[in-house]
């Protein structure tokens, strides 16, 4: 039985397979490197969620055939397959299932914000658990959001939204206001989707590698390998 004070913290994750993840980073990355980077993003998010207070950690994974790989990555997390035709349907379905299963609130977050401080994620968790707001959002710098937390099922927040556009956050907030929901936003963060984002990520993690240890380690090894190849050609 789930304690009534428990908030579900849900990582929305796709199996990190070449040519299935982070394809917009190819080039400069190879498909294999992009998959390794995505796996590092996931490992860092799992470690981050483990350090939160007051959360039940869960991974909503895709595709369903990859359950065993997620069991190996996070044996201490609950697992549930994603279901739905688009991102909105998958998020709504998983959040509604968790709320219907006895959690007092539920948060969904992806893996593409490796520089997100744990304190921001904890703040979002505390906000939605407090009951002072009905909706918490983590704004992404591209106009979307990297995190959403709710206390009840609100289909209007997810239905018929063009997810890869710069208006997602504003549409969601507008719909929340129309529904009379009390909404709050935590600090913004940038998604790593493009080569420009990757360059920015390298710079941030060079200064603060502890934000995402697995990711910073991979990027450092990749940079060292590139320098060795350039030296051998000169």
Image: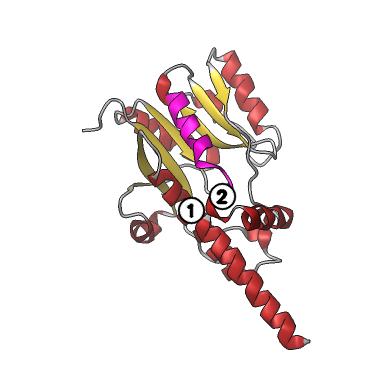
Mark 2 neighbour class, 10 Å CA radius: few under 14, some 14 to 19, many 20 or more: many
Q: Which label sits on residue 12?
A: none
Judged left or right of residue 205, residue 120 is left
Magenta residues span 112-128
User: Outermost residue, right direction?
Assistant: 234
CB within 8 Å, label 2 to label 1:
yes
Mark 1 neighbour class, 10 Å CA radius: few under 14, some 14 to 19, many 20 or more: many
Dot 2: element: loop
132 is within the stretch colored magenta? no
Depth order, front residue of 33/208: 208
Reply above or below: 38 against 160. Answer: below
Q: Residue at x 58, y 46 (%)?
A: 113
In this rendering, the count of numbered labels is: 2
Q: Which label sits on residue 44?
A: 1
- Res 19 visible: no
State the CA–CA distance, disc 2 to disc 1. Answer: 7 Å
120 is within the stretch colored magenta? yes
Q: Residue 12 at x, y = what percent?
A: 47, 45
Q: Quadrant of the C terminus?
A: bottom right
Q: Residue 24 at x, y = what percent?
A: 67, 58
Q: Residue 162 at x, y = what percent?
A: 65, 36
Q: Residue at x 64, y 36 (%)?
A: 144
Task: Identify the image quadrant of residue 7.
Answer: top left
Q: Which label sits on residue 114?
A: 2
């Amino acid at each position: 039985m789930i304690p009534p004070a428990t908030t579900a913290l849900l990582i929305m994750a796709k199996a990190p397979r070449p040519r299935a993840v982070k394809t917009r980073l190819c080039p400069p990355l190879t498909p294999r490197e992009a998959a390794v980077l995505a796996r590092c993003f996931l490992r860092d998010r799992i470690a981050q969620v483990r350090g939160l207070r007051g959360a039940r950690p869960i991974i909503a994974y895709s595709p369903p055939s990859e359950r065993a790989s997620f069991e190996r990555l996070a044996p201490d997390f609950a697992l549930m397959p994603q279901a739905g035709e688009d991102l909105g349907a998958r998020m709504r379905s998983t959040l509604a299932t968790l709320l219907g299963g006895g959690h007092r609130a539920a948060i969904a977050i992806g893996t593409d914000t490796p520089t997100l401080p744990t304190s921001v994620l904890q703040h979002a968790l505390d906000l939605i658990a407090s009951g002072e707001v009905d909706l918490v959002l983590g704004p992404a710098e591209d106009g979307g959001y990297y995190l959403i937390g709710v206390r009840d099922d609100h289909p209007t927040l997810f239905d018929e939204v063009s997810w890869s556009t710069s208006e997602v956050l504003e549409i969601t907030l507008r719909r929340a206001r129309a529904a009379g929901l009390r909404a709050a936003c935590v600090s913004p963060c940038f998604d790593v989707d493009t080569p420009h984002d990757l360059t920015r990520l390298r710079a941030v993690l060079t200064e603060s590698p502890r934000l995402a240890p697995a990711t910073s380690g991979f990027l450092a090894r990749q940079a060292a390998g590139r320098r060795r190849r350039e030296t051998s050609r000169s």
